[in-house]
Image (cartoon, rainbow, N blue to C red):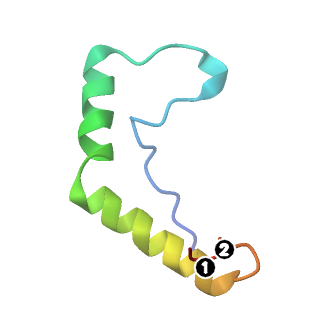
Amino acid sequence: MPYITPEPDPLIIDDSLDRKLTPEEQAALNKRMHSPAYHQAVAEAEREFARQFPEYASPKK
């Protein structure tokens, strides 16, 4: 199966450009960062990372 390059995410800014987000870009990023889907995806990624690399996972307190 050939590797398919994903379309670039317009909200990921190349740091080498050294520019600030426009108000519209910042609003779109804030909306995504505070969405339940984002928090669910982060939690799933953290669980998967802890499963694959238990030596790096922070201990439960």
Q: Percent from the top left, x then y, of residue 17?
A: 60, 18
Q: Is residue 41 placed above or below 14 in the rendered structure?
A: below
User: Which of the 4 image quadrants contains residue 26?
Assistant: top left
Please report contact status of discs 2 and 1: CB closer than 8 Å, yes or no: yes
Residue depicted at x 47% and y 56%: 6
Q: Is residue 42 placed above or below 48 in the rendered structure?
A: above
Quadrant where the image shows the C terminus: bottom right
Earlier sequence position, callout 2 versus callout 1: 1
Residue depicted at x 41% and y 19%: 21
Residue depicted at x 42% and y 74%: 44
Side of 34 relative to 58 (left or right):
left
Side of 56 relative to 42 (left or right):
right
Label 1: state its secondary structure.
Answer: helix
How many discs mark residues in the rendered view? Answer: 2
Residue depicted at x 66% and y 74%: 57
Quadrant where the image shows the N terminus: bottom right
Label 2: state its secondary structure.
Answer: loop
Q: Amino acid at mark 2?
A: Ala
Q: Is residue 60 placed above or below 22 in the rendered structure?
A: below
Q: Percent from the top left, x then y, of residue 54?
A: 70, 83
Of residues 19 and 35, the one nearer the viewer is 35
Q: How busy is the neighbourhood of tag 2: few (under 14 within 10 Å), some, or many (20 plus)? A: few
Query: Label for residue 57?
Result: 2
Real-space CA distance between mark 2 and mark 1, rounded to the nearest whole angstrom: 5 Å
Q: How busy is the neighbourhood of tag 1: few (under 14 within 10 Å), some, or many (20 plus)? A: some
User: Which of the 4 image quadrants contains residue 43?
Assistant: bottom left
Query: Label for residue 9?
Result: none
Query: Label for residue 50?
Result: 1
Q: Percent from the top left, x then y, of residue 28?
A: 26, 33
Which residue sits furthest right? 55
